[in-house]
Image (tube, rainbow, N blue to C red):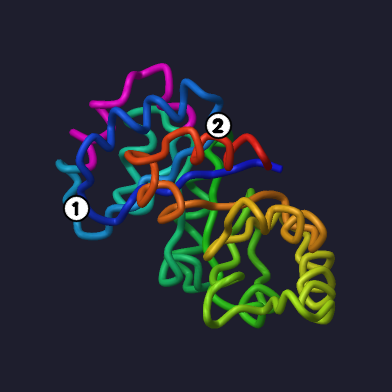
Amino acid sequence: MEVIVITSSSEKEKEITQIIRLFENGLQTLHIRKPKWSKTDISVFIESIPQEYHSKIVIHGHYKLAIKYKLKGIHLHRKHRNNKLKNRWNRLLIKLRHPSLIITSTFNSIESLRENSLSFDYVFLNSVFTSHSYYNKDEEAGVNLLKSILNKANIPVYALGGVTKDRIDVVRAAGFQGVGLSSAVWKHIDKNPQEVLSLIQAA
């Protein structure tokens, strides 16, 4: 399974240094998610990361930067994935002009994932192990529900929300392609970087 790391939504001390360290230890995909940052802020952030890693970066917003810096892809917000003509046209243009650019998104419920008719390279299913979880460790029903939805999704789905090392086996059993990590990384990487690296390698 692949592990994808998502940046903190706010500025973190030593974040660039830690990102480089993650790449050096095998991280294949980083999502830059800074919803309140300007295009200039994101540009500076990307330029602070060595160019050799740009092809492993997916950005949430300011999508033209993905082309400027030859990034891995873009992550569509919910408002950009609806089927309005403008959105359909923009998605088509992106794929026609930049066929190697991947397009991803996040679904916040199994219902929205089930109803999705768009093609993505992969998506996240949010809140898998949070207070609004679909999984109960004492019941197989939650895992079986996830498995049935993922089998019908026809796109790779990554588990997001509350993923820890001891839940990797459950994620795998449910049929997820991988996991997305954010707080599990940024809350612990300064104090216990080896634990974070082992979590990434455990998958």
Instruction: From the viewer's side, name the closer residue of 180 and 154.
Output: 180
Measuring 60% from the left and 78% from the top, which residue is drawn there?
Answer: 133
143 is higher (above) or lower (below) than 51: below
Q: In this view, does 136 lie to the left or right of 195?
A: right
Picture coordinates of residue 165, whole percent (x, y): 62, 51
Picture coordinates of residue 176, whole percent (x, y): 73, 57
Camera-side mark, 1 or 2: 2
State how many labels appear: 2
Q: Circle 2 is placed at which residue position?
A: 28
Residue type (three-letter) at the residue carrying disc 1: Trp
Asked which quadrant contains residue 148, the reply is bottom right
Q: How far apart are marks 1 and 2 (CA)?
A: 24 Å
Q: Split into 4 quadrants, where in the image is the N terminus?
A: top right
Q: Circle 1 is placed at which residue position?
A: 37
Residue type (three-letter) at the residue carrying disc 2: Gln
Measuring 24% from the left and 26% from the top, which residue is drawn there?
Answer: 48
Disc assigned to residue 136: none
Q: Is residue 53 left or right of residue 104?
A: left
**Crowd tier of the residue under label 2, counting other residues whose Cα lies within 10 Å: few below 14, some 14–19, many 20 or above:** some
Asked which quadrant contains residue 164, the reply is bottom right
Q: What stretch of residues is rendered in magenta? A: 42-56
Q: Element under label 2?
A: loop
Q: In this view, does 131 lie to the left or right of 59?
A: right
Measuring 72% from the left and 50% from the top, which residue is drawn there?
Answer: 177
Measuring 45% from the left and 30% from the top, which residue is drawn there?
Answer: 22
Picture coordinates of residue 57, whole percent (x, y): 44, 36
Q: Do the residues labelled 1 and 2 touch (CB within 8 Å)?
A: no
Predominant secondary structure, magenta span: helix
Picture coordinates of residue 126, whole percent (x, y): 55, 68
Q: Split into 4 quadrants, where in the image is the C terminus?
A: top right
**Crowd tier of the residue under label 1, counting other residues whose Cα lies within 10 Å: few below 14, some 14–19, many 20 or above:** some
Q: Element under label 1?
A: loop
